[in-house]
Image (cartoon, rainbow, N blue to C red):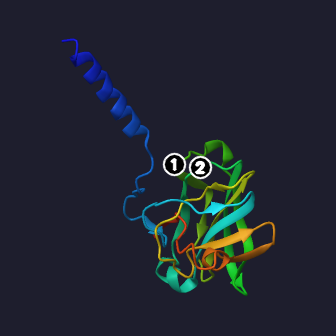
Amino acid sequence: MRYILPIFLSLIFLFACEEGNNNSDPVIDAPLVFLNYDGSNLTAPNLSAGTYEAAAKFTSDETASMQNGQLTEVYFYLLNTPSSATVKIYRGTDQGFPIELIYSKGVTSSMEANSWNHHILDAPIDITQEDLWIAIRFQTGQQDQIVGCDPGPADVNGDWLFENADGNWDRLLRRSNNEANINWNIRGVVDPS
């Protein structure tokens, strides 16, 4: 009898830990569809202290079948929590960079480490014939691993990074001299109806 109670308490603790774990891939119900390049989370690139935007760019060709739909939610994986984070959506591309910021919302207070984070947009965004960029802006005061990534290989539009220090957008693959061959764990949810 004295062994049953510790085993029972251990099972309750194990269940509680698994219940709070939010690092398995998110699931959505049809007719909703994911807009993404990434696979399951593997890790996160190690970036120096600074302010960044990790982004996935979806071209109008890639969203053509969804052009009567709306972007309604964003999922993103955080390995560690930054000092601040913002979900940003851009529309259009000029010379390889996003043109128009159409949505920005701070999510610092709701961040969870080692987890898929979920943000419902304040208002749905129409899918149009322009490119759509889904970005996570974050700031860290030290070298750290923040926005999660899959094991790759990188899609040409799945690993965009803006670095405040140089004011430029570029692919992480190029910034890392081909060492970080990954896609960001950033996913949009589209209601196609």
**Which residue is under mark 2?**
80
Image coordinates for residue 156, horizontal then vertical, percent: 56, 82
Q: With 133 as the anchor, is 51 left or right in this view?
A: right
Image coordinates for residue 38, horizontal then vertical, percent: 47, 69
Number of the label disc, if any, that sits on residue 61? none
Q: With 71 as the anchor, is 5 left or right in this view?
A: left
Image coordinates for residue 11, horizontal then vertical, percent: 29, 29
**Which residue is under mark 1?**
114
Q: Which quadrant does the C terminus fall into?
A: bottom left
Seen at 52% across and 72% down, the residue is 182
The amino acid marked with disc number 2 is: Asn
**Label 2 crowd (10 A; few <14 / some 14-19 / many >=20):** some
Residue projecting furthest to the left: 1
Q: Earlier in the sequence, mark 2 or mark 1?
A: 2
Seen at 37% across and 63% down, the residue is 30
Badges 2 and 1: C-beta atoms under 8 Å apart? Answer: yes
